[in-house]
Amino acid sequence: MERTFLMIKPDAVQRGLIGVIIAKLEAKGFKLAGLKLIKVDRALAEEHYVEHKGKGFFEPTVDYIMSSPVVAMVWEGKNIVAMAREMMGATNPANANPGSIRGAYGMDISRNIIHGSDSPTSAEREINLYFKPAELLDYKKAGEEWLSE
C-alpha cells in the first residue's frame, strides 16, 4: 500500500478545520498511519521547503508554516499520492474545484489549507522529516477488503 505525507497548515488549524479535513480523508477510505500536532521550527521548515530556497516566496512560506501548530499526517491507500492531491485541489484555491478541500475552504494561494506530497519519492522524504519509523503504525483496518480488489 502506498503512503503519503499530508499537513494541515496553520490557517486550517486556526480556523478549526482539522476534523473536517480528516473526516474527508477517512470517508474516502484512506487509512491513517501517523498523526501529530506540532510546532514546526525554522530548521524543519527550511528543510521541508528546500526546493524553493532562493525563490521570492521561500521566506514568507517558512514564516507562515512556523506561525501556528500544524497537523502532520501519514496516510495509506491505493494510489494515495495522486488521489490525495486530487482531493486537495489546485494549489491556488481560486482555481480549485469547489468540492476539493482547497476549493471548499481555501481563500488564498498563500493560505491554502493543506500540503500533500507530490510524488511517492517526496512522500518518503517528507514522512522521514516529520516521523520516526516507530511513530508510524501498520495495522489492519476494518472494512479494507471492501475498498478495492
Image (cartoon, helix red, strand yellow):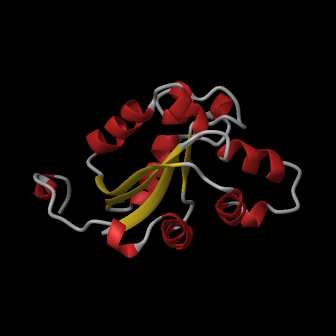
Residue 97 in view of the camera: no
The one nearer the camera, 135 or 147, is 135
Against 68, residue 17 (above or below) is above
The structure residue drawn at horizontal position 27% and vertical position 39%, both measured from the top left corner, is 27
Against 88, residue 136 (above or below) is below
Q: Within the image, what quadrant is residue 23 found in?
A: top left
Against 139, residue 94 (above or below) is above
Residue 65 in view of the camera: yes
Residue 21 lies left or right of residue 121; in this view the side is left
Residue 56 lies left or right of residue 20; in this view the side is right
The structure residue drawn at horizontal position 33% and vertical position 66%, both measured from the top left corner, is 136
| Position in image of residue 19 (x %, y %) | 37, 33
Residue 23 lies left or right of residue 113; in this view the side is left
| Position in image of residue 76 (x %, y %) | 33, 60
Q: Quadrant of the C terminus?
A: bottom left
Against 139, residue 73 (above or below) is above
| Position in image of residue 59 (x %, y %) | 82, 50
The one nearer the camera, 108 or 66, is 66
